[in-house]
Amino acid sequence: MKLPSKSKPYIIPEYSLTGDLLSFLTCNLQYRYQNKGTLPPSKPVQRWFGEFIHGVMEEAYLEWDYKKTSFPWDWIDDIRPIEEQIDLRLQTRGLYPYDEDLFFSMSNHPEVEYLNEHDHKKLASARAEKAINIWGKHLFPLIDSSEHLIKGVRPMPNYDEHKSRSNYYGINGVVDVLTSMKINDLEQSNLDNFNNEIIAFLKKDPNFQKRIKEQDGEDYEIIIDYKGMKRPPTIVTNPKVEDKWETHKQQILTYSWLRSKQEDAKPIVAGIIFYLNELVPSKEDLVLIKEELKDELTDVGNEFEDDVKLIERWEEEDKAPELSDGFKISRSIRIINVDEEEQENALLMFDSVVDNIESSLIREMNGCKIQEAWKADSDERTCSACDFRTFCKNNSVKTKDIKIP
Ligand code: SF4
Protein backbone atom coordinates (compact mmCIF):
# COMPACT_ATOMS: atom_id res chain seq x y z
CA MET A 1 0.00 0.00 0.00
CA LYS A 2 1.36 3.39 -0.94
CA LEU A 3 1.20 5.86 1.91
CA PRO A 4 0.46 9.44 0.87
CA SER A 5 3.27 11.84 1.72
CA LYS A 6 2.50 14.68 4.09
CA SER A 7 2.12 17.95 2.24
CA LYS A 8 4.45 20.81 3.08
CA PRO A 9 3.10 23.06 5.85
CA TYR A 10 1.52 26.26 4.58
CA ILE A 11 3.31 29.05 6.41
CA ILE A 12 2.74 32.74 5.85
CA PRO A 13 5.79 34.80 6.84
CA GLU A 14 4.89 37.45 9.43
CA TYR A 15 6.37 40.93 9.47
CA SER A 16 6.01 43.49 12.19
CA LEU A 17 5.98 47.22 11.61
CA THR A 18 8.53 48.12 14.23
CA GLY A 19 10.59 44.92 14.52
CA ASP A 20 10.96 44.43 10.78
CA LEU A 21 10.13 47.55 8.77
CA LEU A 22 11.97 50.12 10.91
CA SER A 23 14.78 47.75 11.81
CA PHE A 24 15.46 46.62 8.21
CA LEU A 25 15.52 50.22 7.01
CA THR A 26 18.16 51.09 9.65
CA CYS A 27 20.58 48.51 8.20
CA ASN A 28 19.76 45.32 6.28
CA LEU A 29 22.71 43.34 7.64
CA GLN A 30 22.23 44.43 11.25
CA TYR A 31 18.57 43.43 10.93
CA ARG A 32 19.63 39.98 9.65
CA TYR A 33 21.96 39.35 12.58
CA GLN A 34 19.60 40.74 15.20
CA ASN A 35 16.23 39.54 13.99
CA LYS A 36 16.73 36.50 11.82
CA GLY A 37 19.76 35.32 13.76
CA THR A 38 17.98 36.14 17.04
CA LEU A 39 21.08 37.79 18.43
CA PRO A 40 19.98 40.58 20.74
CA PRO A 41 22.18 43.68 20.75
CA SER A 42 24.69 43.69 23.61
CA LYS A 43 23.99 47.34 24.47
CA PRO A 44 20.34 47.82 23.62
CA VAL A 45 20.27 51.39 24.95
CA GLN A 46 17.81 52.84 22.48
CA ARG A 47 15.66 49.72 22.81
CA TRP A 48 15.70 49.92 26.63
CA PHE A 49 14.57 53.54 26.67
CA GLY A 50 11.92 52.97 23.99
CA GLU A 51 10.45 50.02 25.90
CA PHE A 52 10.81 51.81 29.24
CA ILE A 53 8.89 54.90 28.17
CA HIS A 54 6.18 52.83 26.45
CA GLY A 55 5.80 50.70 29.58
CA VAL A 56 5.68 53.74 31.87
CA MET A 57 3.01 55.47 29.77
CA GLU A 58 0.89 52.31 29.55
CA GLU A 59 1.11 51.61 33.28
CA ALA A 60 0.48 55.26 34.15
CA TYR A 61 -2.68 55.18 32.04
CA LEU A 62 -3.95 52.01 33.79
CA GLU A 63 -3.21 53.62 37.16
CA TRP A 64 -5.04 56.81 36.16
CA ASP A 65 -7.97 54.83 34.78
CA TYR A 66 -8.30 53.02 38.12
CA LYS A 67 -7.63 55.80 40.61
CA LYS A 68 -8.21 58.99 38.57
CA THR A 69 -5.30 60.66 40.40
CA SER A 70 -5.28 64.32 39.42
CA PHE A 71 -2.29 65.91 37.68
CA PRO A 72 0.51 66.85 38.19
CA TRP A 73 1.75 63.55 39.57
CA ASP A 74 4.49 63.58 42.14
CA TRP A 75 7.66 61.90 40.90
CA ILE A 76 8.58 60.13 44.14
CA ASP A 77 5.07 59.07 45.23
CA ASP A 78 3.30 58.44 41.92
CA ILE A 79 5.83 57.97 39.12
CA ARG A 80 8.92 56.36 40.66
CA PRO A 81 7.03 53.16 41.69
CA ILE A 82 5.83 52.76 38.08
CA GLU A 83 9.38 53.24 36.78
CA GLU A 84 10.72 50.60 39.14
CA GLN A 85 8.05 48.13 38.10
CA ILE A 86 8.81 48.65 34.39
CA ASP A 87 12.56 48.47 34.98
CA LEU A 88 12.16 45.11 36.75
CA ARG A 89 9.91 43.85 33.96
CA LEU A 90 12.56 44.78 31.38
CA GLN A 91 15.32 43.17 33.45
CA THR A 92 13.50 39.82 33.26
CA ARG A 93 13.82 40.15 29.47
CA GLY A 94 17.52 40.95 29.72
CA LEU A 95 17.09 44.66 29.05
CA TYR A 96 19.02 46.91 31.43
CA PRO A 97 19.54 50.65 31.46
CA TYR A 98 23.05 51.33 30.26
CA ASP A 99 24.21 53.48 33.10
CA GLU A 100 26.71 55.75 31.41
CA ASP A 101 24.82 56.27 28.19
CA LEU A 102 21.27 56.25 29.31
CA PHE A 103 21.12 57.37 32.89
CA PHE A 104 24.05 59.65 32.25
CA SER A 105 24.72 62.40 34.70
CA MET A 106 22.64 65.42 33.82
CA SER A 107 23.82 67.56 36.70
CA ASN A 108 23.96 70.59 34.45
CA HIS A 109 20.41 70.08 33.22
CA PRO A 110 17.77 72.32 34.83
CA GLU A 111 15.06 69.65 34.76
CA VAL A 112 16.97 66.97 36.59
CA GLU A 113 17.03 67.24 40.35
CA TYR A 114 19.37 65.25 42.47
CA LEU A 115 17.57 63.66 45.36
CA ASN A 116 20.09 61.44 47.07
CA GLU A 117 23.05 59.32 46.15
CA HIS A 118 21.05 56.26 45.14
CA ASP A 119 17.84 57.78 43.94
CA HIS A 120 18.86 60.17 41.20
CA LYS A 121 16.13 61.44 39.00
CA LYS A 122 18.12 61.11 35.81
CA LEU A 123 17.30 61.62 32.18
CA ALA A 124 14.89 58.69 31.67
CA SER A 125 12.93 59.63 34.80
CA ALA A 126 12.86 63.32 33.92
CA ARG A 127 11.34 62.40 30.56
CA ALA A 128 8.85 59.98 32.09
CA GLU A 129 7.68 62.66 34.51
CA LYS A 130 7.25 65.26 31.77
CA ALA A 131 5.53 62.77 29.45
CA ILE A 132 2.95 61.92 32.13
CA ASN A 133 2.40 65.42 33.46
CA ILE A 134 2.44 67.21 30.10
CA TRP A 135 0.82 64.73 27.68
CA GLY A 136 -0.71 62.08 29.96
CA LYS A 137 -2.95 64.72 31.48
CA HIS A 138 -4.52 65.49 28.07
CA LEU A 139 -4.21 62.06 26.50
CA PHE A 140 -5.49 59.65 29.17
CA PRO A 141 -9.09 61.01 29.18
CA LEU A 142 -9.25 60.43 25.39
CA ILE A 143 -8.03 56.81 25.39
CA ASP A 144 -10.35 54.11 24.12
CA SER A 145 -7.84 51.25 24.21
CA SER A 146 -4.11 50.90 24.68
CA GLU A 147 -1.58 48.36 23.38
CA HIS A 148 -4.05 47.39 20.67
CA LEU A 149 -2.89 44.44 18.53
CA ILE A 150 -3.58 44.70 14.79
CA LYS A 151 -2.93 42.12 12.08
CA GLY A 152 -3.52 41.78 8.37
CA VAL A 153 -2.56 39.81 5.29
CA ARG A 154 -1.29 41.06 1.92
CA PRO A 155 -0.34 39.32 -1.32
CA MET A 156 3.39 38.55 -1.49
CA PRO A 157 5.03 41.15 -3.74
CA ASN A 158 6.54 39.68 -6.95
CA TYR A 159 5.18 36.24 -6.06
CA ASP A 160 6.87 33.40 -7.95
CA GLU A 161 5.50 29.92 -7.21
CA HIS A 162 8.94 28.32 -7.68
CA LYS A 163 10.96 30.78 -5.63
CA SER A 164 8.71 32.61 -3.14
CA ARG A 165 8.14 31.18 0.34
CA SER A 166 4.41 31.95 0.26
CA ASN A 167 1.79 33.72 -1.84
CA TYR A 168 0.81 35.97 1.11
CA TYR A 169 2.58 37.66 3.98
CA GLY A 170 1.22 38.83 7.33
CA ILE A 171 1.69 42.29 8.87
CA ASN A 172 1.27 42.88 12.57
CA GLY A 173 1.76 45.75 14.93
CA VAL A 174 0.72 47.12 18.27
CA VAL A 175 -0.94 50.53 18.35
CA ASP A 176 0.16 52.32 21.53
CA VAL A 177 -3.13 54.13 21.94
CA LEU A 178 -6.45 54.29 20.12
CA THR A 179 -8.60 57.27 20.88
CA SER A 180 -12.21 57.53 19.96
CA MET A 181 -13.96 60.88 19.65
CA LYS A 182 -17.23 62.30 18.46
CA ILE A 183 -17.35 64.98 15.81
CA ASN A 184 -19.82 66.91 17.94
CA ASP A 185 -17.32 67.01 20.79
CA LEU A 186 -14.89 68.80 18.54
CA GLU A 187 -17.41 71.11 16.93
CA GLN A 188 -19.09 72.07 20.16
CA SER A 189 -15.74 72.29 21.95
CA ASN A 190 -17.01 70.01 24.74
CA LEU A 191 -13.52 68.74 25.30
CA ASP A 192 -12.20 72.29 25.54
CA ASN A 193 -13.85 72.42 28.95
CA PHE A 194 -10.74 70.93 30.38
CA ASN A 195 -8.39 72.78 28.00
CA ASN A 196 -7.29 69.72 26.15
CA GLU A 197 -4.00 70.58 24.41
CA ILE A 198 -4.25 67.63 22.03
CA ILE A 199 -7.66 68.80 20.80
CA ALA A 200 -6.24 72.32 20.48
CA PHE A 201 -3.40 71.05 18.25
CA LEU A 202 -5.85 69.02 16.15
CA LYS A 203 -8.15 72.00 15.71
CA LYS A 204 -5.27 74.07 14.36
CA ASP A 205 -4.45 71.47 11.71
CA PRO A 206 -6.16 72.29 8.37
CA ASN A 207 -5.87 68.71 7.02
CA PHE A 208 -7.53 67.33 10.12
CA GLN A 209 -10.38 69.85 9.85
CA LYS A 210 -10.88 68.91 6.19
CA ARG A 211 -10.98 65.18 7.04
CA ILE A 212 -13.53 65.76 9.80
CA LYS A 213 -15.81 67.66 7.44
CA GLU A 214 -15.72 64.74 4.98
CA GLN A 215 -16.97 62.25 7.59
CA ASP A 216 -20.54 60.97 7.29
CA GLY A 217 -20.76 59.37 10.71
CA GLU A 218 -20.50 60.79 14.17
CA ASP A 219 -17.57 58.81 15.60
CA TYR A 220 -13.97 58.67 14.48
CA GLU A 221 -10.63 57.38 15.73
CA ILE A 222 -7.11 58.69 16.07
CA ILE A 223 -4.05 56.43 16.29
CA ILE A 224 -1.35 57.48 18.72
CA ASP A 225 2.26 56.35 18.88
CA TYR A 226 4.96 57.26 21.41
CA LYS A 227 8.56 57.52 20.29
CA GLY A 228 11.47 57.57 22.72
CA MET A 229 13.46 59.91 20.50
CA LYS A 230 13.72 63.51 19.35
CA ARG A 231 11.68 64.88 16.43
CA PRO A 232 13.44 63.70 13.27
CA PRO A 233 14.53 66.23 10.62
CA THR A 234 12.04 66.65 7.76
CA ILE A 235 14.87 66.66 5.22
CA VAL A 236 17.68 64.11 5.28
CA THR A 237 20.77 65.28 3.42
CA ASN A 238 22.94 62.17 3.92
CA PRO A 239 21.62 59.30 1.72
CA LYS A 240 23.05 56.77 4.22
CA VAL A 241 20.85 58.11 7.02
CA GLU A 242 17.41 56.57 7.32
CA ASP A 243 14.59 59.05 6.67
CA LYS A 244 12.81 58.56 10.00
CA TRP A 245 10.38 61.39 9.26
CA GLU A 246 9.01 59.43 6.33
CA THR A 247 9.15 55.95 7.89
CA HIS A 248 7.23 57.11 10.99
CA LYS A 249 4.51 58.46 8.71
CA GLN A 250 4.41 55.16 6.79
CA GLN A 251 4.10 53.31 10.09
CA ILE A 252 1.04 55.31 11.18
CA LEU A 253 -0.57 54.97 7.76
CA THR A 254 -0.02 51.20 7.74
CA TYR A 255 -1.47 50.97 11.26
CA SER A 256 -4.49 52.92 10.08
CA TRP A 257 -5.04 50.48 7.18
CA LEU A 258 -4.73 47.46 9.50
CA ARG A 259 -7.08 49.03 12.03
CA SER A 260 -9.63 49.88 9.33
CA LYS A 261 -9.92 46.13 8.57
CA GLN A 262 -11.05 45.33 12.12
CA GLU A 263 -14.76 44.88 12.68
CA ASP A 264 -15.24 47.49 15.39
CA ALA A 265 -13.14 50.17 13.64
CA LYS A 266 -14.50 53.66 13.12
CA PRO A 267 -13.12 55.98 10.43
CA ILE A 268 -9.51 56.88 11.25
CA VAL A 269 -8.94 60.53 10.52
CA ALA A 270 -5.43 61.14 11.83
CA GLY A 271 -2.43 59.81 13.63
CA ILE A 272 -0.40 61.53 16.32
CA ILE A 273 3.22 60.80 17.18
CA PHE A 274 4.69 62.02 20.45
CA TYR A 275 8.47 62.50 20.28
CA LEU A 276 9.01 62.30 24.02
CA ASN A 277 12.74 63.20 24.12
CA GLU A 278 11.77 66.72 23.06
CA LEU A 279 10.27 67.29 26.50
CA VAL A 280 13.73 66.90 28.08
CA PRO A 281 16.31 66.91 25.29
CA SER A 282 19.73 65.44 26.08
CA LYS A 283 22.98 67.14 25.10
CA GLU A 284 23.15 64.91 22.01
CA ASP A 285 19.57 65.87 21.09
CA LEU A 286 20.35 69.56 21.55
CA VAL A 287 23.35 69.36 19.22
CA LEU A 288 21.11 67.91 16.50
CA ILE A 289 18.26 70.36 17.19
CA LYS A 290 20.73 73.26 16.90
CA GLU A 291 22.02 71.99 13.54
CA GLU A 292 18.54 71.31 12.19
CA LEU A 293 17.21 74.75 13.18
CA LYS A 294 20.23 76.45 11.61
CA ASP A 295 19.99 74.49 8.35
CA GLU A 296 16.17 74.69 8.27
CA LEU A 297 15.81 70.91 8.24
CA THR A 298 12.98 70.88 10.77
CA ASP A 299 9.36 71.97 10.57
CA VAL A 300 8.87 73.22 14.14
CA GLY A 301 11.03 75.53 16.24
CA ASN A 302 12.13 78.55 14.21
CA GLU A 303 8.92 80.41 15.09
CA PHE A 304 10.07 80.45 18.75
CA GLU A 305 12.65 83.24 18.38
CA ASP A 306 13.76 83.39 22.03
CA ASP A 307 14.35 79.63 22.16
CA VAL A 308 16.25 79.72 18.88
CA LYS A 309 18.55 82.43 20.27
CA LEU A 310 19.18 80.39 23.42
CA ILE A 311 20.03 77.31 21.35
CA GLU A 312 22.27 79.29 18.98
CA ARG A 313 24.28 80.64 21.89
CA TRP A 314 24.46 77.25 23.66
CA GLU A 315 27.72 75.25 23.44
CA GLU A 316 28.15 71.61 24.39
CA GLU A 317 30.06 72.34 27.58
CA ASP A 318 27.38 74.81 28.81
CA LYS A 319 24.37 74.12 31.00
CA ALA A 320 21.37 73.07 28.91
CA PRO A 321 19.35 76.16 27.87
CA GLU A 322 16.05 76.79 29.65
CA LEU A 323 13.74 76.33 26.71
CA SER A 324 10.11 77.40 26.87
CA ASP A 325 7.33 74.84 27.36
CA GLY A 326 5.74 76.09 24.14
CA PHE A 327 8.87 75.18 22.16
CA LYS A 328 9.23 71.74 23.74
CA ILE A 329 5.54 70.85 23.55
CA SER A 330 5.18 71.97 19.91
CA ARG A 331 8.24 69.96 18.89
CA SER A 332 7.05 66.86 20.72
CA ILE A 333 3.72 66.47 18.87
CA ARG A 334 3.29 65.57 15.21
CA ILE A 335 -0.07 65.15 13.48
CA ILE A 336 -0.19 62.78 10.52
CA ASN A 337 -2.88 63.19 7.93
CA VAL A 338 -4.54 59.85 7.12
CA ASP A 339 -6.04 59.60 3.66
CA GLU A 340 -6.57 56.66 1.32
CA GLU A 341 -3.97 57.70 -1.26
CA GLU A 342 -1.23 58.15 1.34
CA GLN A 343 -2.30 54.87 2.96
CA GLU A 344 -1.91 53.04 -0.38
CA ASN A 345 1.59 54.53 -0.86
CA ALA A 346 2.59 53.39 2.65
CA LEU A 347 1.40 49.85 1.92
CA LEU A 348 3.34 49.77 -1.35
CA MET A 349 6.41 50.88 0.56
CA PHE A 350 5.85 48.10 3.15
CA ASP A 351 5.46 45.62 0.24
CA SER A 352 8.77 46.75 -1.20
CA VAL A 353 10.55 46.32 2.18
CA VAL A 354 9.07 42.81 2.51
CA ASP A 355 10.15 42.07 -1.06
CA ASN A 356 13.74 43.12 -0.21
CA ILE A 357 13.79 41.04 2.99
CA GLU A 358 12.37 37.99 1.20
CA SER A 359 14.88 38.35 -1.67
CA SER A 360 17.81 38.50 0.79
CA LEU A 361 16.42 35.52 2.74
CA ILE A 362 15.99 33.45 -0.40
CA ARG A 363 19.52 34.33 -1.57
CA GLU A 364 20.85 33.17 1.80
CA MET A 365 18.72 29.98 1.74
CA ASN A 366 20.20 29.23 -1.69
CA GLY A 367 23.73 29.26 -0.28
CA CYS A 368 24.80 32.88 -0.66
CA LYS A 369 27.03 34.13 2.20
CA ILE A 370 25.24 36.30 4.76
CA GLN A 371 27.27 39.42 4.03
CA GLU A 372 26.62 39.03 0.32
CA ALA A 373 22.91 38.34 0.71
CA TRP A 374 22.22 41.32 3.00
CA LYS A 375 23.31 44.90 2.29
CA ALA A 376 25.57 46.49 4.91
CA ASP A 377 24.91 50.19 4.78
CA SER A 378 24.12 52.64 7.53
CA ASP A 379 25.12 56.00 8.96
CA GLU A 380 28.17 56.46 11.17
CA ARG A 381 26.15 56.83 14.36
CA THR A 382 24.36 53.49 13.87
CA CYS A 383 27.57 51.73 12.83
CA SER A 384 29.57 52.98 15.80
CA ALA A 385 27.01 51.40 18.18
CA CYS A 386 26.67 48.20 16.14
CA ASP A 387 27.86 44.88 17.61
CA PHE A 388 28.80 43.57 14.17
CA ARG A 389 31.07 46.42 13.09
CA THR A 390 34.29 44.46 13.66
CA PHE A 391 33.53 41.93 10.96
CA CYS A 392 31.13 43.97 8.83
CA LYS A 393 32.43 44.75 5.36
CA ASN A 394 31.58 48.39 5.84
CA ASN A 395 35.29 49.23 5.94
CA SER A 396 35.03 52.88 6.77
CA VAL A 397 33.55 51.97 10.16
CA LYS A 398 36.01 49.17 10.83
CA THR A 399 39.00 51.37 10.15
CA LYS A 400 37.70 54.14 12.41
CA ASP A 401 37.21 51.68 15.21
CA ILE A 402 40.79 50.44 15.35
CA LYS A 403 42.49 52.21 18.19
CA ILE A 404 46.30 52.16 18.34
CA PRO A 405 47.45 52.01 21.97
S1 SF4 B 1 28.50 48.12 11.13
FE1 SF4 B 1 27.00 49.47 10.17
S2 SF4 B 1 26.77 48.68 8.09
FE2 SF4 B 1 27.73 47.06 9.33
S3 SF4 B 1 26.05 45.78 10.09
FE3 SF4 B 1 26.46 47.31 11.66
S4 SF4 B 1 25.05 49.03 11.18
FE4 SF4 B 1 25.18 47.73 9.38
Image (cartoon, rainbow, N blue to C red):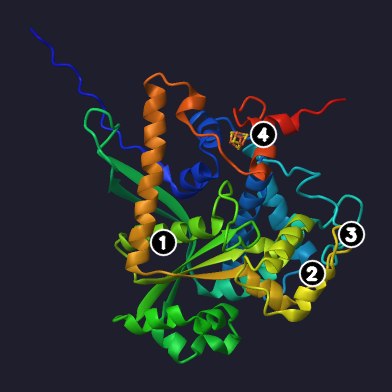
Residue 232's place in the image compared with 359, above or below, is: below
Q: Tag 3's secondary structure? A: loop
* x 58%, y 82%: residue: 196
**Does any atom of ligand 1 lie closer than 8 Å to the CB of label 1?**
no
* x 73%, y 56%: residue: 81
Q: Tag 1's secondary structure? A: helix
Quadrant of the image containing the N terminus: top left
Q: Tell me the distance, in whole angstroms, between the alpha carbons under discs 2 and 4.
A: 32 Å
Q: Which mark is residue 396?
A: 4
Q: Tell me the distance, in whole angstroms, between the alpha carbons under discs 2 and 1.
A: 33 Å
Q: Which mark is residue 311?
A: 2
Residue 342 x, y percent position in the rendering = 37, 64
Residue at the outermost top position? 1
Mark earlier in primary sequence (3, 2): 3
Residue 373's place in the image compared with 285, above or below, is: above
Residue at the outermost left position? 1
Label 4 near label 3: C-beta < 8 Å? no
Q: Tell me the distance, in whole angstroms, between the alpha carbons under discs 3 and 2.
A: 28 Å
* 4 vs 1, front mark: 4
Residue 254 x, y percent position in the rendering = 40, 57
Residue underneath mark 3: 115
